[in-house]
Amino acid sequence: MKKLFFLCVFVIAYFTLYPWTFVPFHGHSTILEGLRPLVGKSDYLDIVVNLCFYLPLGVLGVLGWWKGSRTAGRWIALAAFGAALSFTLETIQAWVPGRDSSLLDILTNTIGTIAGARLGIAIAGHLPSDLRWGLPSPRWPMPAVLIAAWLMSQWFPFFPILRIPQFSESLHALMQVSSLGWIDLADAFVAALLIGRLLREALTSSAYRLGLAGACLVLPARLFIVVGAAPWPLAVAFAAGVLVFHPALARVHAGTRLLAAAAVLLIAVRELDPFHFAGPAGPFYWIPFSGFLEATRDSAIRVISGKFFLYGAAVWMAREAGVSLGIAASGVGGLLIAGECAQRYLPGRVAESTDPILAVIAACVIVWLKDRPPTPARLPARHVREHDRHDNRRD
């Protein structure tokens, strides 16, 4: 719960200071505007949003630190932390264009923290004893990391659409299918197969089907996020991949090997697209992440997250299929190196060292998370002795 508390602090800071563009402070800027009369529905809506925004902070603060204690000191400490966090972020907003800070925001955020603390006490009373003051560590942490990377590639910067013109543009993008190619549809289909396998490892059996249903809603939900809607055929291809995985591929004994092969094949296809070689050879950029640093921040993060998901899933699936982690990472990295070298002769492609390094980073994350490789099931000792006696009789 403490990790979730700090994650909540990060989320609050992220959305409060979005779009993370800072300009020099000018005299006409206002730091912490004083209390003023409420005018119009938008002011009342801001109050509701600010109250709800800090509710999770109070809930997680109780579940992470109180341990059943309800002393006044803990109430004051949690309320003071919420007020200090709000004061700091509201002050920094004076340097963010288009954002306004006020004392009313700090007051409503503090009240939201206190209300969240009261709600956290009520929630703690109804949780099982083993979950009341903490969450169990996931058995397979790498699938959870890869799922998070895929969500980043689809939803970043996670900011909802708040204006009608933006929603109209997103709705228009939903119907744009002329620019789609078969590689885009194959990408969505294979991603669904990989997500289905990762969800099966990351979630319990009772939450697995719910996770699959939620995954099918990720692409349609882009309609309401500033990243813009994905063309509807991609959502259909993803749903088709989920339907193929759940009733069929999940029950195939060699399903993991097929998924590893599908991921590797998709990497090869994406590296060699558009399959039209021409000379002379273009440059090779040896500095890692140079294109990432020069591109637009939001789109660059989505691209890097999508590549990390695909390369990491390929390495993890190969490891799950019985290949050693070193060979899996070397194989995927070698394929990417060959593809990047071939891209020097592909018009419109940029050859760089970032992609192979991402595969190596994914392997390092697997080691760092101590994600355990699959172990063959062992028979009980009695069954082993009976099996040995049976073999001796045959000899």
Image (cartoon, helix red, strand yellow):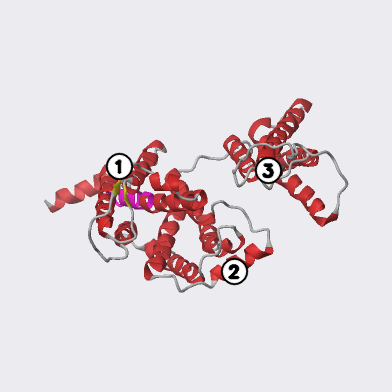
What crowding class fits label 2: few (fewer than 14 Cα within 10 Å), some (14-19), or many (20 or more)? some
What crowding class fits label 1: few (fewer than 14 Cα within 10 Å), some (14-19), or many (20 or more)? few
For residue 30, side relative to residue 363 (left or right):
right
**Height in image: 224 above or below 295?**
below
Location of mark 3 (residue): 56
Q: What residue type is labelled 2?
A: Leu
Give the magenta part as a residue range. 312-323
Location of mark 1 (residue): 381
Helix, strand or loop at label 3? It is helix
**Which quadrant holds residue 370?**
top left
Location of mark 2 (residue): 171
Helix, strand or loop at label 1? It is helix
Q: Position of residue 309 (x, y in %)?
A: 41, 51
Q: Earlier in the sequence, mark 2 or mark 3?
A: 3
Q: Position of residue 222 (x, y in %)?
A: 56, 61
**Height in image: 114 above or below 147?**
above
Q: Nearer the viewer, mark 3 or mark 1?
A: 3
